[in-house]
Amino acid sequence: MEAFAVPDLPEIEEGDDIGALVAERVDLREDDVVLVASTVVSKAEGRAYDLDDFPPGPRAREIAARITEIAGDEEERDPRFAQAVLEESNELLMEAPFLLTETRFGHVGVNAGIDRSNTGGADLLLLPRRPSESAARIRDSLPVDAPVVVTDTSGRPFRHGQVGVALGWDGVPASRDWRGETDRDGHELEVTVESVVDELAATANLVTGEGDDGTPVVVVRDWAFGDHEGSENLFREVQGDFVREALRGWEFDG
Amino acid sequence: MEAFAVPDLPEIEEGDDIGALVAERVDLREDDVVLVASTVVSKAEGRAYDLDDFPPGPRAREIAARITEIAGDEEERDPRFAQAVLEESNELLMEAPFLLTETRFGHVGVNAGIDRSNTGGADLLLLPRRPSESAARIRDSLPVDAPVVVTDTSGRPFRHGQVGVALGWDGVPASRDWRGETDRDGHELEVTVESVVDELAATANLVTGEGDDGTPVVVVRDWAFGDHEGSENLFREVQGDFVREALRGWEFDG
């Protein structure tokens, strides 16, 4: 398996055809996986906004006041920012000391994944509205049949630091399902579902790093999903997500 | 960057020199990253046990009884298994419907990462006692200076499925620290710490998959940590880990 960044991409702007820009620079092969950072997908889709686009309601004001009290960073204290996060979210899992929410497409992340650096001049860059649909559109514009994954970076409980994760995907299942398969001793495997799109996103992030440096697209070559069942679930159902349940009953008091 | 499985490794047994076995099969280059599945590290280190090695105390009996009530899997209902998990753990974060603990070396995982498939004939395969020390020993036995990462797979809150993660590492920092670095517009980056050892482990797991199929060691070639600050933290401190705090106050009642 090989992974490399697509060279010499221009700064992506609203309306750009990311698939065409990639295909002009790489001789794509069938089954190459094309991993696209959500920042450039958002830019192409016109998801840049100014803070003034989000006049805050009472709940956003309340959240921002609470975060101000705790001393969140400058942007987090702005009720317009809280309003933007609320509008992008299905559910708030934590309101303080920072906003942890489930986005409208199911991903759980801090501040609904809204970016405030590398926004191309706007105040805010929202995540793509439906990243799997974005992946499908980019895939359609490629000259060969290659899976596409829209990626972001995300922190996680229990472990320091961020890693690359998938937000949307098309042309590859989210996970390999090993249920019923056995190990070398003939015992059924305990790990039953492997989230390959997240692992692909982690691989892409290793190659590009966070600065992007103009390399927001990575190609993974000579990797095969293999002869396994696939699953399209990446985001946990609320039912059985005990951490989410615990957070619902928790209040920051630090 | 390239990633490939080390071919034709024998079944690893207690006392085996994993570094030597790898070096016989791959012409390792300086700065290749060698990723070794914790299962084979555990086997080489004699971490296979029988359930009878863990005579259960009252707490293990209580936990197993609770899990039996909820209908955990067969092994989880055995108080000897609960005892083994307790002995491998610093802290229990959840006791039901399954045991989620912090292992003695800081990793948070289900059942303290104790394996019950691919154990090489024993009932249980415990994680390496100190995986970063294991990584250092394997690194010392390589003919070139190449970083070593000991890997496992792990589930995570909010997201379905498991991904490859690092348990121990030597010769590469756990994370790249981007603090103070800026994006193309000159804004300071929001993501400040990238957990590269976890991303390397995810890459390795993409190549091997879960069945292992006799490929528990992966080499990542032509990847560079780059000119960044490094950090040795991978496991979060209790202080500031809000999910852990929330779990401490939570009780399963399903």
Image (spheres, coloured by chain):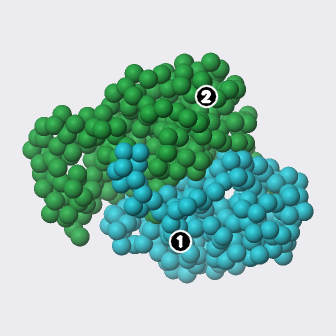
Chain colours: A cyan, B green
The quarter in which the C terminus of chain B is drawn is: bottom left
Please say if A253 is above or below B6: below
Please say if B244 is above or below B48: below
Percent position of residue B234, x then y:
50, 40
Percent position of residue A99, x then y:
51, 65
Label 2 belongs to which residue?
Answer: B25
Amino acid marked by disc 1: Glu
Q: What element carries label 1?
A: loop
Q: Which chain does the numbered disc 1 sit on?
A: A
The quarter in which the N terminus of chain B is drawn is: top right
Q: Is mark 2 on a helix, strand or loop?
A: helix
The answer to whether one can see residue A9 in this image is no
Q: Which of the pair A179/B64 is nearer the observer?
A: A179
Query: Residue at coordinates 66% horizontally, 34% vertically from top-left?
Result: B229
CA neighbours of label 1 inside 10 A, class few (<14), some (14 to 19), many (20+): some
How far apart are labels 2 and 1 at the CA level?
A: 37 Å
Query: Residue at coordinates 58% horizontally, 51% vertically from top-left?
Result: B206
